[in-house]
Amino acid sequence: MSRQTAHGDVRDLALAPQGVRKTEWAGQEMPVLRLIRERFARERPLEGVRISACLHITSETANLALTLQAGGAQVALCASNPLSTQDEVAAALVAEYCIPTFAIKGEETSTYYRHIHQALEHRPHITLDDGADLVSTLHKERQDLLPQVIGGTEETTTGVIRLRAMAQQGRLRYPIIAVNDADTKYLFDNRYGTGQSTIDGITRATNILWAGKKVVVVGYGWCGRGVATRARGLGAQVIVCEVNAVRALEAVMDGYQVMPLLEAARIGDIFITVTGDIHALDAPHFAVMKDGALLANSGHFNVEIHIPALEQMAQAKRRVRPFVDEYTLHDGRRLYLLGEGRLINLAAAEGHPSSVMDMSFANQALSVEYLVKHGRSLAPGVYKVPQEIDHQVATLKLASLGVRIDSLTEEQERYLRSWEAGTE
Ligand code: ADE
């Protein structure tokens, strides 16, 4: 049987059958997205819409792409990180699902940006981004494409921070929905998704025992909370380092030890950065770490651990296992950098579990539909996910889990709208 094949740049098209099985497996854990896909197939709300999406190329992302395709969109994909691509899924997208995909696990930075440019060649009406590299490239190097762009979505905290900076400087030229900030995204994906998948990535890379280890979590945002919770659950002694006083106080009352990173650096066995900022772990920390310390990052970019400083301090470097690089310092101490400092949950494991991506990507699909309907009337800027979408995702997810909840009586609704009644 002949089959049309989309173009793209992937490692090996022969991996496609494996990618299909993996995508179908993930799809079984994505019931909310499945419902949206079925409705999209009936209603075709994205007919003729071209979408360029820069996302981690995983089996969950494949399910999102298929949902958008079912709605009538023509989708092109590129990777949002050089080390997060699942090559078999990329092959399936091109060879089986007819979705042009430009992504190879381990690609060089130059190839990564070439792939972004190739996805932009699709001339998008809508952009989907995870980290804002596509949007930033479009604004810096492909302004000719701007007039036809209706809007975009952004998946992650780091991307939203960059977009807000662009908007503040008057540089953002179209409306973008911050999917990250939906309650049904960050409360689940950032916390439970990052929590589990970060531990998963470090475990797969190293096969360490967590029980009894001193784990230093750097950053106590939603991702940091998730990582700290799961590390504690495995029996680790968790230390939190955080620059924001309110968050640090929360960490204290959540029962963690809280201290400056330079102090934690002397005692930690495993360091995990989830700050969204640059050089959280730097030369002064490396200088005092114990022999054998593990360094991992689960923030979006590979800048949280200052790798050039580590390289400079090292006398020797060798790869001891996949995703584990040993740096021997001048005094003989060995520090182990995991996943080249890129997000360890996607580099050494498979990213967040499908069940949590179900909610994130349901928000994505419904936000795209919203933009196609309303985007032309929105001024450039960063927008919240409409509350109806957030609620719809929560309601459908609960239903898929077989969980029923109560609703307010009319009397209770009325009471909440009133102010006259007080102490009785
Ligand atoms: N980000 C984190 N985990 C992911 C996954 N499994 N798929 C796509 N993006 C992700």
Image (cartoon, rainbow, N blue to C red):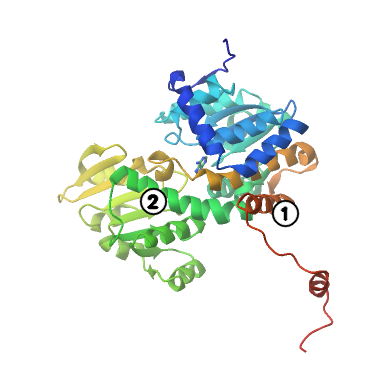
Q: Is residue 11 left or right of residue 397?
A: left
In the picture of the structure, the residue carrying the numbered disc 1 is 387
- Given residues 46 and 135, the one toward you in this image is 46
Image coordinates of residue 373 in percent, x first then y, are 79, 38
Image coordinates of residue 221 in percent, x first then y, are 50, 59
Q: Residues within 10 Å of mark 1 (few under 14, many from 20)?
A: few
Q: Is residue 20 left or right of residue 400?
A: left
Helix or strand or loop: what does disc 1 sit on?
helix
Residue 279, placed above or below residue 39:
below
Residue drawn at x 51%, y 69% as measured from the top left:
246
Q: In this view, does 201 lie to the left or right of 115?
A: left
Tell me the quarter of the image containing the C terminus. bottom right
Residue 420, placed above or below residue 51:
below
Residue drawn at x 32%, y 39% as measured from the top left:
323
Residue type at the position of mark 1 = Gln
Residue drawn at x 34%, y 40% as measured from the top left:
340
Say which label, 1 or 2, has the lower sequence index. 2
Label 1, label 2: how far apart the Cα atoms are: 32 Å
Res. 339 visible in picture:
yes
Image coordinates of residue 61 in percent, x first then y, are 55, 36
Helix or strand or loop: what does disc 2 sit on?
helix
Residue drawn at x 63%, y 49% as measured from the top left:
400
Q: Does the residue labelled 1 lie within 8 Å of ligand 1?
A: no
In the picture of the structure, the residue carrying the numbered disc 2 is 199
Would you identify the image quadrant in which residue 369 lies?
Answer: top right
Q: Residues within 10 Å of mark 2 (few under 14, many from 20)?
A: many
Tell me the quarter of the image containing the N terminus. top right
Q: Is residue 298 left or right of residue 34?
A: left
